[in-house]
Image (cartoon, grey):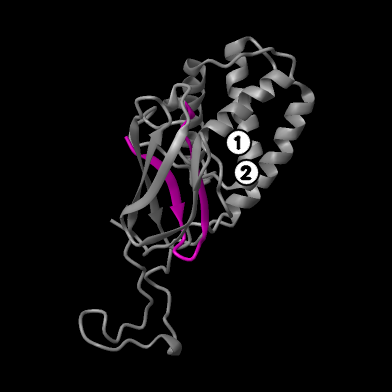
Amino acid sequence: MSVSWGSKDPNEVRNVAYSWLGRLNGAEIASATLTVQDGTVTLSNVANTTTGISATVSGGQDCETATIVSRIVTDESEPQTLEQAFTIEVRDNASALGPSTSTKRQIVEMAYEECSLSGYEFNVTPEELFSGLRSLDALMAEWAGSSKDLGYNFPATFGGGGLEDVSGIPDVAINGVAISLAMSLAPKMGKQMSAETRARLSRAMSVIGAVCARQASMGWARSTVAGAGNRRWGWGPSYGSPFMTTRRPCR
């Protein structure tokens, strides 16, 4: 299964990283490669540590989905070669809400930390992390349906994503999302969040409201007059039309 690195504007330079810890089983990375398998994005600053890889992604054409493949060789006496594919969508205005660099795991862990800071001692198990991920999916779907669309990287099917997937949420909104998720998780633990946490959530939601108000426009309405600076040349049904035409969406 591929891991999503979210979406980027063609002109955006994105730093990406991936931790192999969950698949190394105590081993370390002896060597690693990162290559573009499909798409026109460019990789630079490719590097690896003993447990992870990183790179800078730039370029790409609007509406393409690039595929990048990481291959590593472990340092075991009988080395293993492991492979992981990543996808990154290239979309105009993808960065209109600001940079997004967090993974879903980071948000879920922040939410559990919020519960812990409120006096709840909690050792998060893998099952609880994935439960938190499903709660994050549900919370973001609810927000998207109520005019708080933060560009979340939804999985193809509910609960089908991975913790290492890029969240797609602007960094400026991460705190508000994490606290909101903590508020959702706390009752399941029989815990109530403090008044201080609720006050922080109120401030964070004000930021999220401002972020959502800056969302990119959806394009020109059919009745928008083109004006003298947008003359049309050529042929076809739109030739000579006095109105702007909306860009075709990516398919």
State whether residue 115 is above or below residue 80.
above
Q: Residue furthest top?
A: 190
Against 67, residue 218 (above or below) is below
Give the spatial CA distance, label 2 vs label 1: 6 Å
For image coordinates 64% across by 47% down, the residue present is: 172
Q: Are marks 2 and 1 in contact (CB under 8 Å)?
A: yes
Position of the C terminus by quadrant = bottom left
Per the image, label 1 sits on a secondary structure element best described as helix
Image coordinates for residue 37, horizontal then vertical, percent:
30, 52
Q: Is residue 181 left or right of residue 234?
A: right
Q: Is residue 158 magenta?
A: no
Q: Where on the picture, by quarter, is residue 228? A: bottom left
Answer above or below: position of 173 versus 95.
above
Q: Going 78% across and 24% down the picture, which residue do you hit?
A: 195
Q: Furthest-left residue in view?
A: 236
Report the residue marked by disc 1.
Answer: 177
Rendering quarter of residue 98? bottom right
Residue beneath the point at 37% across and 70% down: 222
- The image position of residue 39, as x and y in percent, is 32, 58
Q: How many marks?
A: 2
Residues shaded magenta: 1-21
- For label 2, the SS is helix
**Label 2 Cα neighbours within 10 Å, binned few <14 / some 14-19 / many ≥20:** many
- Judged left or right of residue 155, residue 18 is right
Q: Amino acid at mark 1?
A: Val
| Residue 135 marker | none
Residue 106, how many percent across, how many down?
57, 33
Q: Which residue is mark 2?
A: 173
| Residue type pointed to by label 2 | Ala
Residue 6: x and y, percent? 44, 47
Q: Is residue 193 visible?
A: no
